[in-house]
Amino acid sequence: MKGKVDCFFVIGDEKASQKLVNQFNESALIRQVYVLTKKSLNLENCEQILVEEYASCSTIRQIAKLVRSDYALLALGDSMIEPGQGAIERLVQVAENTDAPMVYADYFEIKDGALSPHPVIDYQMGSLRDDFNFGPVRFYRAEVLKAFRYEYYEMLKYAGCYALRLRASRMGELVHIPEYLFTKTETDTRTSGEKQFDYVKASARERQVEMEQVCTAHLRDIGALLLEPFPETVLTEPFKVEASVIIPVRNREKTIRDAIVSVLIQKTTFNFNLIVVDNYSTDGTTEVLKEYASWGKLIHIIPERKDLGIGGCWNEAVFHPDCGKFAVQLDSDDLYSDENTLQIIVDKFYEENCAMVIGSYRMTNFNLQEIPPGVIDHREWTDENGPNNALRINGLGAPRAFYTPVIREIRVPNVSYGEDYALGLAISGKYKIGRIYQPIYLCRRWDDNTDASLDVAKQNVHNLYKDRIRTFELQSRIQRNKRVDPDKAW
């Protein structure tokens, strides 16, 4: 049994690292423990490997050259870990029983001195986001490291681990063990809302470019890369009005008035209306809407159904007979940045003859003062590769606007999280999307935002749903690509 696993982990402080070396060596299944470090420490019973970047392609190549066992345990995060009782034995057992290219597990988390369980979710075809949480340990079959084509990604500083994981996923199912096999000391104690926009920060741009490169290559390898650019959308279908701003709302008495006013002050060369779908508010929101509806510009809808999420409310609006040619989003927490937003959006539809327009927004606090990270313009979307990269990232931007015949054709999923992303993905696979990179929208962050501070269970539900809709879109693209010339790349 000796020699089935080689362990690789990133060094912490000297005392904690030596403790982990000793814990790994207690297992009869461990052949060798390697410690990845940027400077040598005084450690025993292990081999130290000097690296420049822990997640780089060159680091993965170094690991592959050193592996002599059947499996490689990689713990390349920046938090210290501790293996649970029989953790190594359980990883080997499941890996051998399933022949999985990679195995991972749930873990315990120490945050602010408190120990709590941190379950993770099952991996699927659509789990393409580079921040998928595998826990602190990834347990690979040695063949995966040997099969990785390092020359394709020789210069990658940040995306080596991501590329390796995608390579493993092309070799078989990545298996999740729903057992708590390790404990991780969490050093990033920010809320989910604070972490949400890390990937759009300017400091993350180089990393994002690398991740896009790797994801695009993966889509090509699995036959899901979008082929020739889509034809322009013919925007000639007649409507009573040119545009409708759509606001689904439930219990937003504190913010709905600001949202409504930001619409009513819009200056346009065309006629528009405002459709607010009031999903049985109980806090005074309904009374505010009735007040503004009496002015004639606002259409106040209370649905007959009581099982609607945000997406279902959107369907109520877009299928309303007074919905305009273009359906433009505004959340009940947010505002348009000035009186020109609606004109800019509609102009973009005609400028590019597209089926969807996505804008950029400025993050603010409740009092509309700018807060970090400031402007979110989703520069990771490019005309050349945006529809492919959309499968990797977690959002497409705001505000979102749609050519109404297209949104009626696709329909919005009747959910209250990810419905906008699902719709954007579906459109991005078939139609041209226009982008506005100047901030035309104010995104208000406050305690009542639905994603301000999510617990682990809720984060998992949200992530599982977005991975699932990515899977649906991937499968759709693969099927469509089989019916066209595969030599015509995007």
Image: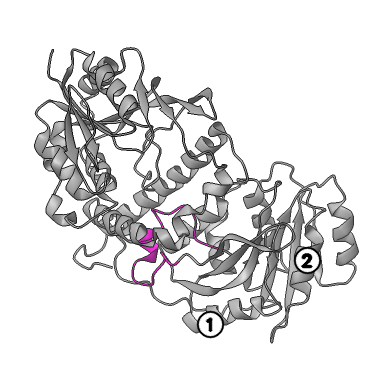
**How is the rendered protein coloured?**
one colour
- Looking at the rendered structure, the kind of residue marked 2 is Ile
Which residue does the image show at 44% across and 63% down from the upper left?
A: 202
Q: Is residue 381 magenta?
A: yes
Which residue is tagged 1? 350
Farthest-out residue, bottom? 269
User: What is the chief secondary structure element of the magenta stretch?
Assistant: loop
Distance, label 1 to label 2, CA atoms, is 26 Å
Q: Is residue 488 magenta?
A: no
Q: Report if residue 17 is visible in the image.
A: yes
Segment colored magenta: 379-397
Q: Report if residue 400 is visible in the image.
A: no
Q: Eyeballing the image, is 418 above or below 274?
A: above
Q: Position of residue 175 (x, y in %)?
A: 31, 29
Which residue does the image show at 82% across and 53% down from the upper left?
A: 253
**Crowding near the residue tagged with mark 2, few <14, some 14–19, many ≥20 C-alpha atoms within 10 Å:** many
Which residue does the image show at 57% across and 42% down from the upper left?
A: 191
Which residue does the image show at 23% across and 49% down from the upper left?
A: 52
Q: Could you tell whether 441 is left or right of 224 in the image?
A: right
Disc 1 secondary structure class:
helix
Which residue is tagged 2? 260
Q: How many marks?
A: 2
- Looking at the rendered structure, the kind of residue marked 1 is Tyr
